[in-house]
């Protein structure tokens, strides 16, 4: 399959998977970290009491 | 309507609902596009099987330009209307645009070697795309260099608009100069010149890449909004501690 050009075609698709997959993974990890930090901070916030 | 859409809370609520659908559509269209590219599209009569590289190289180039255009519109939104989501959109789009530009450069080099006999030439199209990648990198560096998000957004918006001058150069470089890169064959005034059996898989991959870019962008925007909320809460907490110490 792909004749003598197989290394170039496979390398192209591998580069795509590595770069876009790597970015996707970074985005997921980053959001999880931010979610955790936000949840922690929100629990530390003082509760608002209603005034009459 | 715009005021309502500009609300970060509204964006978080709606993007949270829509993102799973976009992610599902991306996987579905990607799988279809890959099947069409590998099993339905014929090899090129001159370039042979290397034409398979086109199905990721060309959509990557489209996304690199699409995301930069979107960043330029966001930059205007930041500078002119101070739109609350404009700089969030700009910041979230930069690494995604840079990634697609890098894919375009690498796959182009890997396609160039068997077809042109070289991985790289300082040709107008290749060089202007490299400049685009460097501009993306500069924008990402500038975001990190300035602590205050408001000031960073304005500085980045100016840099983004200066960098936008490169977009028409990329688009028309193949017409203005004698380049090794082939001229446009899809988006032409007289219609596409590419063989339909190759055009449809390419368009399908274009849709898949667009869905992927939009999904990643909305996801990254949500993360950025969380980061800003954390910053605000940290400032509030620091102020509260400060007032306690002062009392």
Image: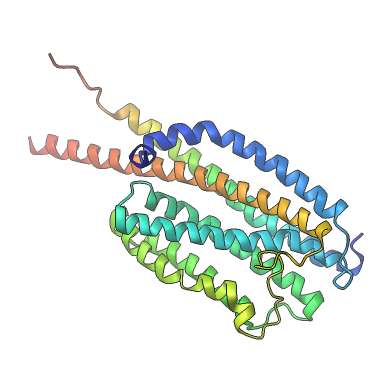
- Locate residue B239, reporting x and y percent: 18, 40
Location of residue A52 (image quadrant): top left
Which residue is more in the foreground, B172 or B114?
B172
From the viewer's perspective, is residue B219 above or below residue B73? above
Residue sitting at the far front:
B190
Number of numbered markers: 0
From the viewer's perspective, is residue A6 above or below residue A35? below
- Residue displayed at 38% across by 53% down: B87
Which residue is more in the foreground, B147 or B24?
B24
Q: Is residue B201 visible to the viewer in this orientation of the structure?
A: yes
- Judge from the rendering whether residue B220 lies leftward or rightward of residue B181; answer left or right: left
Residue sitting at the far top:
A52
Protein image colouring = rainbow
Location of residue B11 (image quadrant): top left
- Judge from the rendering whether residue B176 lies leftward or rightward of residue B164; answer left or right: right
From the viewer's perspective, is residue B155 above or below residue B32? below
- Judge from the rendering whether residue B84 lies leftward or rightward of residue B180; answer left or right: left
- Residue displayed at 67% across by 55% down: A18
Q: Is residue B147 visible to the viewer in this orientation of the structure?
A: no
Which residue is more in the foreground, A21 or B201?
B201
- Residue displayed at 13% across by 34% down: B244
- Locate residue B140, reporting x and y percent: 45, 61
- Locate residue B162, reporting x and y percent: 41, 71
């Amino acid at each position: 399959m792909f004749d003598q050009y197989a290394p170039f075609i496979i390398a192209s698709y591998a580069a795509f998977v590595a770069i876009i997959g790597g970015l996707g993974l970074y985005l997921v990890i980053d959001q999880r970290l931010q979610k955790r930090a936000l949840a922690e901070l929100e629990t530390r916030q003082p509760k608002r009491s209603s005034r009459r | 309507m715009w005021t309502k859409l500009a609300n970060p809370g509204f964006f978080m609520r709606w993007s949270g609902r829509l993102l799973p659908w976009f992610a599902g559509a991306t996987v579905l269209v990607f799988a279809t596009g890959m099947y069409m590219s590998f099993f339905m599209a014929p090899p090129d009569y001159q370039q042979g099987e290397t034409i398979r590289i086109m199905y990721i190289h060309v959509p990557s180039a489209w996304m690199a330009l699409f995301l930069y255009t979107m960043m330029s519109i966001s930059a205007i939104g930041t500078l002119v209307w101070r739109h609350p989501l404009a700089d969030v959109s700009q910041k979230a789009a930069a690494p995604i645009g840079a990634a697609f530009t890098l894919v375009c450069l690498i796959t182009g080099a890997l396609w160039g070697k068997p077809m042109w006999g070289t991985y790289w030439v300082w040709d107008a199209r290749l060089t202007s795309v490299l400049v685009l990648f460097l501009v993306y990198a500069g924008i990402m560096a500038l975001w990190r260099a300035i602590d205050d998000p408001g000031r960073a957004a304005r500085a980045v918006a100016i840099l983004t608009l200066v960098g936008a001058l490169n977009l028409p150069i990329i688009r028309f470089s193949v017409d203005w100069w004698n380049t090794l890169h082939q001229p446009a064959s899809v988006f032409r005034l007289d219609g596409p010149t590419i063989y339909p059996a190759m055009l449809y898989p390419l368009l399908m991959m274009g849709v898949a890449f667009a869905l992927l870019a939009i999904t990643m962008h909305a996801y990254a925007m949500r993360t950025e909004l969380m980061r800003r909320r954390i910053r605000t809460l940290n400032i509030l907490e620091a102020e509260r501690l400060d007032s306690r110490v002062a009392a």
